[in-house]
Amino acid sequence: MLNSLKHFVTSNLRKVEDINRKYAAPQIHMSKMVRISLLFLRLYLLLLVGLLVYKFITLIR
Amino acid sequence: MTVHMSFFDRLFYGFRRSAKTMRIFLLISGPGIIVMLADNDAGGITTYAATGSKYGYGLIWFLVLLLPVAYYVQEMTVRLGAVTKHGHAEAIFYAFGPFWGWFSLIDLILVDWLTLVTEFIGMTAALSIFHVPPVLTVIIVIIIMAIMVIQGRYWTWEKIAFLFCALNLIYIPCAFIVHPSVSDILNQGIIPHFPGGFNNEIFFYLMANIGTTIAPWMVFFQQSAVVDKGLQEKDIAWGKMDTLIGSTFTVVVAIFIVVVTGTVLYGVNIESAAQASLKLMGINKYVGTFMAIGLFDAGFLGAICISLASSWAFGEVFGWAHSLNHKVREAPWFYATYLFAVASAGAVVLIPNAPLVLITLFVQVIAVTLLPAALVFLILLLNDEKTMGKTYRNSPLQNIICISIVVGIILLSTLYGVSALFPNLFS
């Protein structure tokens, strides 16, 4: 059973690598608007994750 | 040579043209109407019921404003799906690369699963009113959901979903039964104003209503449904009509729920639609019963769409066969992920002392992490000429409208999520 689980995990990891390779190069034209939007999204997510982590820490305390 | 037609000839040919138009529309329609009515899910019904009981008819005008919000966002998914023939998850991977692709996919799966749990909470609560044990509700729902998908045709699934969409309109007769004053509805509900003044509490309700109108799974679901249904570029106009009619229905149902609770339960503290149904049963048996049936239907509609949104997304990215037109043996992983999500979400609701309130809260917060990304990617893809071509990309006017709506939704849904995390921040 352990072997089949190992096989399941490794085959899916290989699948993930294939997907990453397939979509490695973003196909959208990276205009200024696209770059600014993606930067905004990154900062927004950092802020949200920060708030979630802060809430989690305060809850534990 | 000119052919002169009599009045009756013109009437006959006019009727035939209209009948043909209606037939084409009925063939093409589906994704828009279903996703919009499924948007009135268990959480949505609770929000509208609470809004009506708190503010009476005072926020009906705000619900009307949500019609163009829902339409313009979802209409973009019709164009994107019809032109690219890809679902939203795959489109994100293709256009923005694996980081954003995995972020969107994993976040979608998480949000969808948590939302599925809330739909099961709504369904079990609704049928508990009729003394149906939760375990029986969960089993019956899983069986119906399984039968709907494994029969192997998108069209059949869609037509069954339409039946449940029709049942979602049960709130309309409810509103007539409670005999609301139409003049009060018009006087209090149509003119934009904030009952009791603009304060943190009303702001919370406004955010909750917006949050329930646009959910991330809707973007993924409609785009994938458009692809699975096989809509082409020439069908986009019909898809837009489908979305507009769906948006109208969703707002109409929301307004009628507000009218019901605003008439009968005004001033009563409502925390869930099931509680509202029970209180309504004490006042009018039929209204309470219809409300409970509507709650079950809302949860069910939400569940069938949300679970498909996840399975489609998974299948698109992993390259599995992922169409409802495939039989189980042709698309085993597609159906396996679907049934696993449904069964596990249903099972959670049956766990004694499961933290269901925490899960409901979590959904609101996690959805906020995905919604801005899904909407921003939608706008960017609709502006990319390489993806959409000159004909179907956003026009400047569409950009002004859509970007304004998306920015507004992001701001308000973020505030909503933050207020859910830190309730004292806005008190």
Image (cartoon, rainbow, N blue to C red):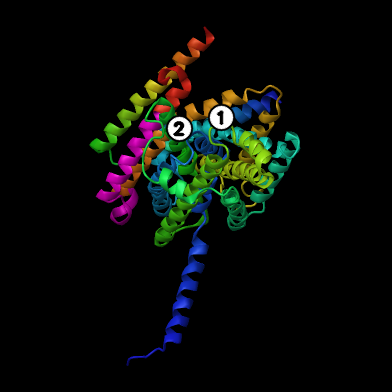
**Mark 2: which amino acid?**
Tyr
Residue B131 is left or right of residue B161, and the answer is right
Residue density around tag 2, few if under 14, some if 14–19, many if 20 or more, within 10 Å: some
Report the disc number at residue B205. 2
Badge count: 2
Residue B105: % across, % down: 48, 35
Occupied quadrant, residue B137: top right
**Mark 1: which amino acid?**
Asn
State the residue at coordinates (73%, 42%). B140
Instruction: Judge depth for marks 1 and 2 and give the one in front.
Output: 1
Closer-to-camera residue (B86/A22): B86
Visible residue check, residue B384? no
Report the disc number at residue B21. none
State the residue at coordinates (26%, 50%). B397
Closer-to-camera residue (B119/B99): B119
Distance in Å between CA atoms under marks 1 and 2: 13 Å
Q: Quadrant of the N terminus of chain B?
A: bottom left
What residue span does the magenta drawing correspond to? B387-414
Placement of B352 over or under A29, stated as above or below: above
Occupied quadrant, residue B405: top left
Closer-to-camera residue (B198/B180): B180
Chain hosting mark 1: B
Q: At numbered mark 2, what does the secondary structure look like: helix, strand or loop?
A: helix
Residue density around tag 1, few if under 14, some if 14–19, many if 20 or more, within 10 Å: few
Query: In the image as oriented, which residue stretches furthest toward the top?
Result: A61
Placement of B247 over or under B344, stated as above or below: below
Residue B50: % across, % down: 53, 34
Chain hosting mark 2: B
Residue A42: % across, % down: 35, 26
Report the disc number at residue B269. 1
Residue B146 is left or right of residue B106, and the answer is right
Is residue B415 within the magenta segment?
Answer: no
